[in-house]
């Protein structure tokens, strides 16, 4: 086009269209306005109507890869969150158990005092001891059976010893020992024969 043609085309839009060559057929032609396809950052974007089939296939493949990466990231985050939640629940339960164990250990002198009162003939302490013992046993407190059992340094604290010919055996219990949910709260204080 010459300068005169350009000037005429600027004044007359129909003349400008007549002087241009008709575009070649592309995918999506005639379907109205097409959204622009997004390219990598920094590259110019191209409308879907101007893209070839190969370009569309490449765009689709890259979109599928990107989608798969987002799905994998979301799944990883979900798994991390689930693990965090499970770990938090387990830690919370462990803190509660630890607190209950400390409370039970703090109440052992009360049981000892009730036992001492009963041993001195005060039967009124028996009801308190039975109620407290029942509550603690329901929560996981167990009395260590000592008298007549083989000596076990994990469960028994030997403070006295008497001669004997057999394997070391607990002959007398001087203070009751307790286990809280499988963990020794207080070893039984015992006299050992053997």
Image: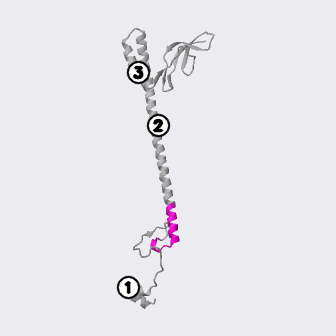
Q: Residues within 10 Å of mark 3 (few under 14, many from 20)?
A: few
Q: Nearer the viewer, mark 3 or mark 2?
A: 3
Q: Residues within 10 Å of mark 1 (few under 14, many from 20)?
A: few
What residue sits 41% from the left and 85% below the top? 17
For label 2, the residue is 91
Q: Is residue 129 left or right of residue 79?
A: left
Which quadrant is the C terminus positioned in? Answer: top right
The label shown at residue 162 is: none
In front here: 108 or 30? 30
What residue sits 51% from the left and 68% below the top? 57
* Residue 120 point in image, percent of width and height: 41, 9
* Residue 190 point in image, percent of width and height: 53, 14
Q: Is residue 86 left or right of residue 12?
A: right
* Residue 124 point in image, percent of width and height: 36, 12
- Residue at disc 3, secondary structure: helix
Query: Which contiguous range is marked in magenta?
Result: 45-64
60 vs 154: above or below: below
14 vs 60: above or below: below
Q: Nearer the viewer, mark 1 or mark 3?
A: 3
- Residue at disc 1, secondary structure: helix
* Pointer 1 with pointer 3, Cβ within 8 A: no
What residue sits 54% from the left and 18% below the top? 156
**Cα–Cα span, label 3 and label 2:** 28 Å
What residue sits 48% from the left and 47% below the top? 79
The label shown at residue 13 is: 1
Q: Residues within 10 Å of mark 2 (few under 14, many from 20)?
A: few
The label shown at residue 134 is: 3
Q: Give the mark, 1 or 3, whose residue is nearer the N terminus.
A: 1
Q: Let me know if residue 75 appears in the view.
A: yes
Q: Give the mark, 3 or 2, whose residue is nearer the N terminus.
A: 2
Corner quadrant of residue 133: top left
């Amino acid at each position: 086009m010459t300068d005169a043609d350009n000037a005429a085309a600027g004044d007359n839009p129909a003349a400008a269209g007549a002087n241009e060559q008709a575009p070649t057929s592309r995918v999506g032609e005639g379907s109205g306005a097409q959204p622009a396809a997004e390219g990598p950052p920094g590259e110019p974007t191209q409308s879907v109507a101007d893209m070839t089939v190969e370009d569309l296939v490449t765009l689709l493949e890259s979109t599928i890869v990107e989608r798969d990466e987002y799905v994998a990231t979301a799944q990883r985050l979900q798994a991390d969150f689930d693990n965090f939640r499970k770990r938090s629940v387990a830690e919370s339960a462990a803190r509660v158990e630890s607190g209950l164990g400390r409370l039970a250990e703090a109440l052992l002198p009360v049981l000892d005092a009730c036992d001492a009162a009963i041993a001195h003939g005060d039967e009124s302490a028996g009801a308190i001891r039975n109620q407290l013992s029942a509550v603690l046993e329901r929560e996981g407190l167990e009395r260590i059976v000592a008298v007549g059992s083989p000596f076990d340094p994990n469960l028994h604290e030997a403070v006295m010893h008497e001669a004997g010919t057999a394997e070391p055996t607990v002959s007398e219990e001087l203070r009751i020992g307790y286990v809280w949910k499988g963990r020794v709260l207080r070893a039984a204080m015992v006299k050992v024969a053997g």
